[in-house]
Image: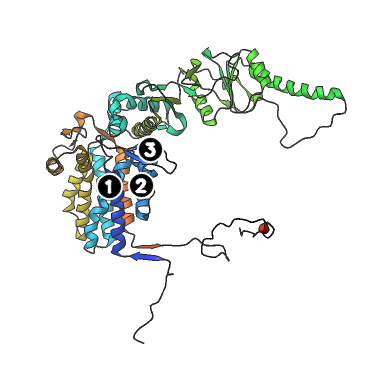
Amino acid sequence: MALHAPVLVLKDSLKRESGTKVHHGNIHAAKAVADIIRTTLGPRSMLKMLLDAAGGIVVTNDGNCILRELDLAHPAAKSMIELSRTQDEEVGDGTTSVIVLAGEMLHVAQTFIDKNYHPTVICRAYTKALEDAIAVLDKIAIPVDVDDRVAMLGLVKSSIDTKFTGQFGDLIADLAIDATTTAGVDLGQGIREVDIKKYIKIEKIPGGQLEDSKVLKGVMINKDVVAPGKMRRKIINPRIILLDCPLEYKKGENQTNAELMKEEDWQVMLQMEEEYIENLCAQILKFKPDLVITEKGLSDLAVHYLGKAGVSAIRRLRKTDNNRIAKACGAVIVNRPEELQESDVGTGAGLFEVKKIGDEFFAYIVDCKDPKACTVLLRGASKDVLNEVERNLQDAMSVARNILKNPKLLPGGGATELTVSATLKQKSSSVEGVEKWPYEAAALAFEAIPRTLLQNCGLNVIRTMTQLQGKHANGENAWTGIDGSSGDMVDMKERKIWDSYSVKAQTFKTAIEAACMLLRIDDIVSGIKKKQAPGASSAPKQPQIEQEGDADNEQMIPE
């Protein structure tokens, strides 16, 4: 019995890789993803052009956007993509840095895996490094005054400089700050919450120039009044009523039959419908509105009554738009006309006007007194440009929102990472045991970001990095970094290149936690089949074309 037959535990169809092979595979995959978007970091960044399945084009350098469009096969690479997505949802900026940093963290771990370090040891060291890094961030962060427009501009600009719209200077930064300060809500204790998704609408209208873009002190909607000839298209200081109910005769929920005995009954029925609508309109007109907006339908009769009273009406508005108008002019959305009160009428708007832009009509409700919602109007040459500008604006608004939420600054241009790196290097000597080496490697990995910035500027990377490391090692100035557009070593305070604290902290946390997770994978089993319905054969059948004969004996498909 010397030769045993090999025992098969897994099915033939399953593929299993384990041990160092998996670690190497994961690290290579993560590095490949990082390399794809490495060139999009910093002001001198390149754009990527992606063709999607439908043949549409996306031109962008937003890390999250690029990775979202890619279709990857490797599981580790897929989890890298999740990183940039969480970063985008959480803080909105730093999607590229997260991936570059995580890729670098895994890259430096490779040597330790070759030397048979246990992954948990590496992870422990990394977590320790992360804690210390966050401590360094807390130390060098400086508070910023939210009302100081110049500081805010510098902050938002440093986020946009790395994007395509950086060349338009303050334009996008201005838009972002205006929009977020408008829509911010004070929660007390100096905390401001900005709901970008709900209360800031971005309207993209092709045509015109980028310089024509602006933030409206109010809302703009892609609608015209119901009866353009009769109703006023320009109203100063309108009284606005917002409804969430149809102004037409209620039809029965299901089909109702009415039997009419006499001919006159028919008249009576019609009369009832008309009176019903007349009542509805009367209830609304009691409050002397100038503008009635409803999310549902408006029957012709109602239009007639409203028009006769000189009231403009807009119908079938999106719910989200209606919420924005309510926030902007101080109205309350009413569900039934019977329940209208004087307090529900919005009087905060200064002007209602319908304008024609291109070949569509847009209704503006602007010059609001204290709007809590706004519309950003973007103009641009082509759809691709507009889409990219919108993505940049999203990032910029997120940065502005983060500062409002947590008003602390860090130096940009790789200065933060270099400071963290230098501090961790000094601390590494006090780390005991085996964890010392991976800890030091993590310190080195933080340099990936300034290094990438330099590569994208096309400078002598090694020489400049050595100078920078020297400056930071003495700890003389934590604010020395790279000016990404020229590649000079400068003091970030002078150049106003800032980063928001919440973005940086989130970047470090996400990157290191992800690196730890990928390092702890030591087995990949692939080829797991979906559970099939019993009795179904394993081979995928060709779709059968049904002949006339087998229409009767059709197979029942199991649920």
Q: Which residue is mark 3?
A: 58
Q: Earlier in the sequence, mark 3 or mark 1?
A: 1
Q: Nearer the viewer, mark 2 or mark 1?
A: 1
| Point 29% across, 40% down: residue | 504
Q: Earlier in the sequence, mark 2 or mark 3?
A: 3
Nearest to the observer: residue 185 or residue 271: 271
Q: Nearer the viewer, mark 2 or mark 3?
A: 3
Q: Which amino acid does the dot numbered 1 rest on?
A: Asp
Please indicate whether residue 545 sits to the left or right of residue 364 in the image: right
| Point 68% across, 20% down: residue | 301
CB of mark 2 within 8 Å of CB of mark 3?
A: no
Which percent across, then down, holds residue 464? 13, 40
Q: Which residue is mark 2?
A: 83
Q: Which amino acid does the dot numbered 3 rest on?
A: Val
Label 3, secondary structure: give it. Answer: strand
Which percent across, then down, holds residue 312? 58, 17
Q: Which residue is mark 1?
A: 35
Please indicate whether residue 479 sits to the left or right of residue 21 in the image: left
Q: Which amino acid does the dot numbered 2 rest on?
A: Leu
**Image quadrant of residue 502?**
top left
